[in-house]
Image (cartoon, rainbow, N blue to C red):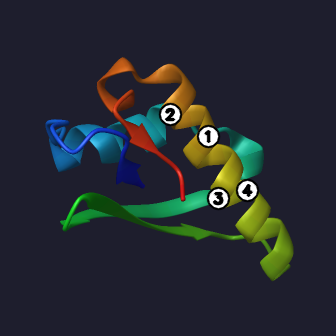
């Protein structure tokens, strides 16, 4: 994720990870999420226990979009 505005403040990493857990659903099969920072972006690493790689990637994008949609603290951020 990158900041839409260079002046955006960076939310707390644990709060972001908590948001992923709060907004994931059982069918996302989220097992682990790790959030890091670098430059003007956030790194989101997720382990989703889908058997198929394509399904895992689709679920990861879905979870990211859901978190961005429902978390006002992340409004300055966008998915790349």
| Distance CA(mark 2)–CA(mark 1) | 5 Å
| On screen, residue 29 above or below 15 | below
Which one is closest to the eye, mark 4 or mark 2?
2
Label 4 secondary element: helix
Report crowding for label 4: few under 14, some 14 to 19, many 20 or more residues within 10 A (C-alpha): many
Which one is closest to the eye, mark 2 or mark 3?
2
| On screen, residue 22 above or below 1 | above
Q: Does residue 3 appear to the left or right of 1 in the view shown?
A: left
At a point 47% along the width and 32% down the height, the residue shown is 22
Q: Position of residue 15 (x, y in %)?
A: 24, 37
* Badge count: 4
Report crowding for label 2: few under 14, some 14 to 19, many 20 or more residues within 10 A (C-alpha): many
Q: Specify the quadrant of the image occupied by residue 60.
A: bottom right
Residue 65 is labelled as 1
Which numbered disc flags the more N-terminal residue, 4 or 2? 4
Which of these two is toward me, 33 or 60? 60
Q: Are marks 4 and 3 in contact (CB under 8 Å)?
A: yes
| Distance CA(mark 3)–CA(mark 1) | 9 Å
User: Residue under circle 3?
Assistant: 60
Q: Position of residue 71 (x, y in %)?
A: 42, 24
Q: Position of residue 51 (x, y in %)?
A: 82, 78
Which of these two is toward me, 78 or 48? 78
Q: Are marks 2 and 1 in contact (CB under 8 Å)?
A: yes
Q: Position of residue 14 (x, y in %)?
A: 20, 46
Label 2 secondary element: helix
At a point 16% along the width and 42% down the height, the residue shown is 10
Which numbered disc flags the more N-terminal residue, 2 or 3? 3
| Distance CA(mark 2)–CA(mark 3) | 12 Å
User: Residue under circle 4?
Assistant: 59
Label 1 secondary element: helix
| Distance CA(mark 4)–CA(mark 2) | 14 Å
């Amino acid at each position: 994720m990158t900041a839409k505005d260079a002046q955006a403040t960076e939310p707390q990493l644990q709060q972001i990870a908590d948001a992923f857990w709060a907004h994931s659903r059982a069918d996302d099969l989220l097992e682990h999420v790790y959030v890091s920072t670098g430059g003007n972006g956030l790194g989101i690493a997720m382990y989703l226990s889908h058997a198929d790689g394509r399904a895992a990637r689709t679920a990861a994008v879905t979870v990211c979009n859901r978190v961005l949609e429902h978390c006002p603290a992340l409004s300055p951020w966008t998915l790349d």
